[in-house]
Image (cartoon, coloured by chain):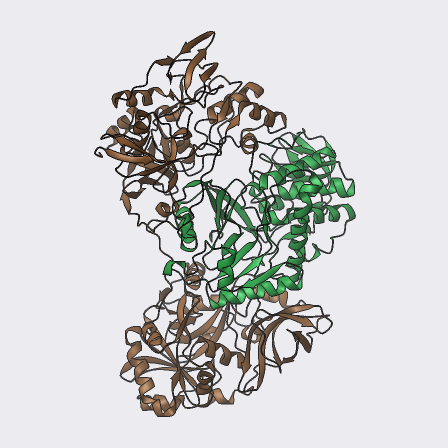
Amino acid sequence: MSGSGEFTFDAVAVPFVPGDHLLTALLRAGLHPTGGGTLCVEGHSPHCVAEVDGVAYVHTCQTLAREGMLVRAQAIGDAPMLPSTDPLAQPVAVRNAHHDVVVIGGGEAGRGAAASIGAPIVDAGDGGEVVGIFPGPMVAVRADAGMVHTHVERVVVATGVLPLLPVCPGNDLAGLYTPKLAERLQAAGVDLGRTVTITEPPQRFEGADRVQAVVVGDERFECDAVIVDIGTTPNDILARMGAGLAVDAVGGASEITAPPPCPTEGTVCPCNETTMAELAECWDRGFTSMELLKRASLAGTGVCQGAVCSPYLQSFIADRTGSLEARFTARPVARQATLSELAAGRHHPAIARTTLHAVHEAAGATMDRFGGWWRPWVYSDVDAECAAVRSAVSIGDVGTLGKFIVSGPDAEAALQRLVPTDVSTIGPGRSRYVLMLDERGYVLDDGMIMREGEGERFFVTVTSGGASVAEMWVRDWTADLDVRWMNVTMSVGAINVTGPRASELLARVGFDQPLAMLRHVEADIADVPCRVVRLSFTGEVSFELHHPCARSAELWRSLLDAGADLGVVPHGLDALSRLRLEKGHIIVGQDSDYDSTPRRLGHDWMVDLDSGDFIGRHAIERTGRLPLDKQLVGLEGDGPPPFEGAVVWSMDGTYAGYVTSAAWSVTLGRSVMLAWVRTVDGMLPDEVRVEGMVARRAELPFYDPEGVRARG
Amino acid sequence: MNEHPEAEITLRWNEPEASYDVVIVGGGGHGLSTAYHLATRHDITRVLVLDAGYIGGGNSGRNTTVIRANYGIPEAVRFYQHSLERYRRLEEETGRSMMHDRKGLLWMAHSEAGVRRERARAAVNQAFGAETVYLEPDEIATTCPEIDLACGGGFPAVMGASFHQGATARHDRVVWALAEGAMRCGVHVAPHTAVTGLIHEHGRIVGVETPAGRVAAGTVVSAVGGNATLLADMAGVRLPIKTHPLQAFVTNRYQRRFDPIVASGDLGFYVSQTARGQMLLGAEIDRQPSYSRGSTYELLASLSHRAITVLPFMRNLRVLRQWTGSCDMSPDYSPIMGDTGVDGFLVTTGWGTWGFKAIPAGGECMAEHIATGVAPELMAPFSLDRFERDRTLADRGSSGTH
């Protein structure tokens, strides 16, 4: 409970006493938050909202007054300004609670239900405003102390009933209160003046700004305040929101009551100031169902979510059709919360860092986000990095690769199902570059399969950033097999040692055994236990060193130290992308599109239709018989490289496709590109135009077509 | 330009009669637009539009009202640009306000890959008539000063963006104006009338079954959203469609000030301020296919978080309402329109997250196809048989957001 003090309402200082809600203090001071309209204590009449400490649309009947609060009037129908400066980021606490059952509503029905099942109660009167009931079920509660996410097996909604607010001329005057509010005000010592209590819907209220008289039937009562006690309606928004979830409504909230008599005049939707006359006009225009009437009249689309108007919409429709139509769909939120409150406890998905991240930053690398990882884009000079790979030796951090250990009696069968190649022919100590296809024969990912020693154990790498999707995919497709997938992406580091002097560098750090292409072996390198994999993405002799990632920095340092006189430098993603482009190697996601079959990618040599069944086989067989409509091809030109994404035009000026990768090849002295190009009459064009430059279709790879350099 | 209770449009409903030239299943934007164009362009008025619920109650009333043409392949750019231009004239044509607002669409990138995507988008857009330019960060700051380019340090900074001459319009008004226009020409619209079966005769579809009885039809068009595959199944047509939920929410109303539509592909979120002054936020589709229209807290929380990362001025805005639509996703992220291989049964589907922007062009094309028997050039590439012929139209400009 708060102490006495003052808050400001617009420019006026308003005193309050302990226990006062803002609304109570305002009314005691002779003020009305929005100027007029019937006020309640349930937080559903929109007539009490105000901007409180920079948050608009706050129900002052729900908010305890505190010293120094800044309250601003918010006239109904006059939307507030958007903040012109950024509000401070206030950390919002979030707490998770777990119960078997929770009861919403601390009234008679709620207390009864709670006592009989021993469940806790959430009640707005205790400052816990229920934002909504969500699948789980999860009850999200907003309180001044923060958000509470209550996870339960079952929810009991005991929110009771709401007082009906009057709909008639003059229902926007000040001085109209529900019985409970009048009680609260009188208990708080607020002088309401001459009050009249009405128990049936009035004809009208009279007055200028404040009510001066109320007419009920043929009688007119002069007064300073009217206590409107004209009936109740089920407070069922949460019960309706919980439809389809484990939610039970009890008490008043669960009852279906006859709607009130249909009013003929006055504002029916206070949030949007829709009048009965406008409702009638919409109806006459053909908006003759609850949902259409709501959308056309806007009644029910405001802050109170139809709590005030929906009983009247029901009676309005029943008057015209003779049948009681259900209230419109209840959607979250039942009680409002700010974006900050809703975002409480959230974080962006982590952008992963390899254990070499700090090493790259210390080396001055520009880091970029790629495939869910931070990766060094360039250290200082991309041309120098490329030159080191082509003429000396260089190291690169490829710890970002997705990595899996696949084991179990059905490991081979599982892989066989996932890739279009004969896995049985990958012998111990050997590896193979593979594609992974979806059911439509489109390329999902690419990677390496390595068989470890004898038996059913494999090490599999996939694209950086592809690991999480790949993991879901492979587990889903092999759930019926006796196979274990262990995702070791985060625990296994990988460094690529590449260049004509790569073998020489490795010999200096303790690895001098011959290792042929696509073979792998376990060995200690600079005292770090590694799997050494001979492959090539850059086109030069390359060794991937897989190792415990805790030792990546040590291994990286040893390689740089041992190769200093060989000219070893690290290369970033930019250099790697250019070098692999010279070799025509694709990057799945950059060069592939949503509908890239192996054939379209020029990779149909990777599909072995003799290897039994695999995902995508049917589609590949079917589409393989059809004429090819587009293909990823190599292009080269003499001008500067176009930007990646540039449009490719036929020589006759029609659209041909777009560039996916482009770079100036220092080695070759021309621009090299990968691009999607459409066929014309089944033929690929020999020449196209890209950003004004004539580009020639070139056989891939551009660089070292015989593959002599990679074999060393 | 604020909303107010409807005082222009008048709708008149009909009980289905026994027979029509064309029966359109689905009284959303596409179904009603097809009916409107059949009546106004081809003088085909013996047309019935059926809906299981109320008109515009599906995705036409659940989308986030963005009109854009910044797609990634020429076929799509031409089609959506035509639609966008039709939208610019649709208020004049129908004589009805749709709160069409040419506010522009800023689509941000937070990575080299994102920059590549937005540059590519601008290039192919310019080549095929859509007005899109690439902006550097300082130009983004000028276009939308509310954006925190640094993203509070909690997410990679904004590195660039494309800016497209996109717009918004009020979705309900679009649906109602097209319905009214069609009704005026004599088209019948029967809401709350579910199609429970299709009538087959000699391999043709010759009508629909409803609880109110059979209705014979020269042509049956499925303009259904969400349940598109279920209806097609009744015709014996298997659609390559997976339906995914997409959620959105709005804040309370504020004075209109926030100008462009702001989207971030990397964050997976977009926001605009409606004619009513509400801030309207959407996200990417749920990964798990489902027909559910339930709302999740996960979305409310994560989308709020993404939004205030880029637009911290929104921190203290309160959320008013959350809802969910159904996105019919095709394998190549492009729509499917026209013949199905079953005589008398046509579809317009695969509208994913891009159905609203295609309402004028989609209905115009479908109507011409029905009237002439020939798919017009704009829609021909989007035929269903492209999957069988392996002539798919992968469109990176579609992606999974609005």
B208 relative position to A591: left or right? right
Residue A141: % across, % down: 33, 39
Residue B46: % across, % down: 75, 36
Q: Residue furthest front?
A: A11
B136, above or below A45, in the image: below
- Image quadrant holding the N terminus of chain B, namely top right
Residue A55, quarter of the rendered image: top left
A219, above or below A357, in the image: above
Chain drawn green in the picture: B
Residue B126, quarter of the rendered image: bottom right
A95, above or below A125, in the image: below
In the foreground, B392 or A173:
A173
**Residue A105, visible in the rendered structure:** yes
Q: Colour of chain A?
A: brown
B22 relative position to A51: left or right? right
Residue A345: % across, % down: 32, 51
Residue at the image point whose x is 57% and y is 21% from the top: A321
Tell me how many marks there are.
0
A693, above or below A336, in the image: below
Residue A452: % across, % down: 37, 76
**Residue A426, visible in the rendered structure:** no
In the foreground, A541 or B73:
B73
In the foreground, A117 or B43:
B43
Residue A80, quarter of the rendered image: top left
In the foreground, B76 or A38:
A38
